[in-house]
Amino acid sequence: MSVLTKQARRLKRRRRVRAKVTGTAARPRVSVFRSNRGISAQLIDDVSARTLAAVSWTEAALRELAPTERATRAGALLAERAKAAGISTAVFDRGGYLYHGQVKALAEGAREAGLTL
């Protein structure tokens, strides 16, 4: 019996979800990455392997906010950039993280700004 680290368990969940979730040009995948310092997200078209829009916590508008507020604002920014690219719906890929805290705040911020997840 092997003991998996926390990161290895997350990557295992991530691979399991990615086997089922795929993004297209009409309905891209919202890929979330969360670190100890911040959060970032991308809208990805897996068919053509292109990033359509992205947002990161290192941007000036997000850097000085509290973590949960930063994630909510990042979701809203991603939704605005998606609308500018002509995208209204997307599929959410939480990246193996729990749908809680910053990941949940990012998704709710995107939904409030008009992106259908």
Image (cartoon, rainbow, N blue to C red):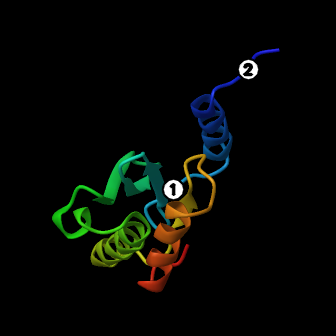
Tell which of 66 and 38 is nearer to you: 66
Q: Quadrant of the C terminus?
A: bottom right
At label 1, the amino acid type is Gly
**Residue 100, image x, y percentages:** 61, 62
Q: What residue is shown with label 2?
A: 3
At label 2, the amino acid type is Val
Mark 2 and mark 1 in contact? Answer it, CB < 8 Å.
Answer: no
Q: Residue at x 59, y 50 (%)?
A: 97
Q: Residues within 10 Å of mark 2 (few under 14, many from 20)?
A: few
Precedes in sequence: disc 2 or disc 1: 2
Q: Residue at x 52, y 76 (%)?
A: 108
Count of marks, rendered view? 2
- Lateral position of residue 111 relative to residue 49, left or right: right
**Residue 61, image x, y percentages:** 20, 70
Q: Residue at x 50, y 80 (%)?
A: 111
Q: What residue is shown with label 1?
A: 23
